[in-house]
Image: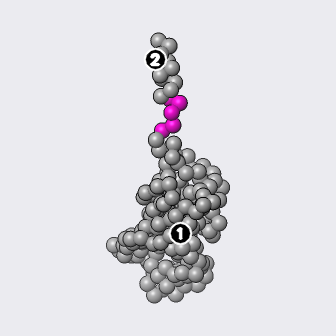
């Protein structure tokens, strides 16, 4: 009986495989910052509108879940992003569509983004940056006012290769494949 209890304790005390190699949230935040700053920096444009003016909703919960975390409470604080983003979820996309123009009121003019890991070794990592935004065609944009024009949802996902530096930080190495939907 004692052997069974000790075996049960040993099994329960072992970390789950996904948890044993999870990156700390602060590192996930550093990775997200690195990816956002190299793929959609503030001075770049999405459908003719600068990212700086468009703004980015970042899905903290979806990003943390992709890296193996179940609880995303306090996610903005734990990831501590330096990028200028606001918290958002995929519920922002419910009134948007790729096939036919929709109001896309919840998303407004913002982009929606999240990061998912693809592969990782000791010194290299590949993540996928997923970005969606409304394209309102030729509608005139006035800062902070969403045009009444309906929008098509446009998106892309891009592989981003990162390398670990001697100080342990993950740095942008190169862009990989891109998948585009329009």
- First reached walking from the N terminus: tag 2 or tag 1: 2
- Return the residue at label 1: 172
Instruction: Bin the neighbour count of mark 2 within 10 Å (Cα to Cα): few under 14, some 14-19, many 20 and up.
Output: few
Which quadrant would the C terminus be assigned to in this image? bottom left
Viewer-proximal residue among 118 and 163: 163
Q: Describe residue 33's horizontal placement relative to residue 65 as left or right.
A: right
Examine the rendered structure and indicate whether residue 137 appears above or below residue 65.
Answer: below
Local SS, label 1: strand
- Return the residue at label 2: 4
Viewer-proximal residue among 129 and 119: 119
Residue 53 in percent (x, y) is at 59, 79
Q: Residue at x 55, y 51 (%)?
A: 23
- Would you say residue 147 sits in the magenta stretch? no
Residue 58 in percent (x, y) is at 55, 64
Q: Are marks 2 and 1 in contact (CB under 8 Å)?
A: no
Examine the rendered structure and indicate whether residue 14 appears above or below residue 44.
Answer: above
**Residue 95 appearing in the image:** no
Local SS, label 2: helix
Residue 106 in percent (x, y) is at 51, 67
């Amino acid at each position: 009986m004692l052997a069974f209890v000790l075996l049960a304790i040993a099994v329960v005390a072992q970390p789950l495989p996904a948890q044993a190699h999870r990156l700390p949230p602060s590192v996930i935040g550093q990775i997200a910052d690195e990816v956002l700053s190299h793929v959609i920096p503030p001075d770049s444009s999405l459908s003719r509108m600068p990212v700086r003016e468009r703004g980015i909703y970042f899905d903290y919960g979806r990003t943390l879940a992709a890296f193996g975390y179940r609880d995303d409470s306090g996610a903005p604080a734990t990831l501590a992003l330096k990028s200028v983003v606001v918290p958002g979820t995929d519920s922002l996309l419910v009134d948007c569509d790729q096939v036919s123009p929709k109001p896309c009121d919840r998303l407004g003019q913002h982009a929606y983004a999240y990061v998912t890991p693809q592969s990782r070794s000791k010194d290299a990592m590949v993540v996928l940056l997923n970005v969606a935004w409304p394209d309102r065609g030729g509608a005139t944009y006035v800062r902070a006012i969403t045009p009444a024009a309906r929008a098509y949802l446009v998106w892309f996902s891009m592989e981003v290769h990162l390398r670990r530096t001697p100080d342990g930080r993950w740095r942008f190495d190169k862009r990989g494949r891109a998948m585009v939907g329009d």
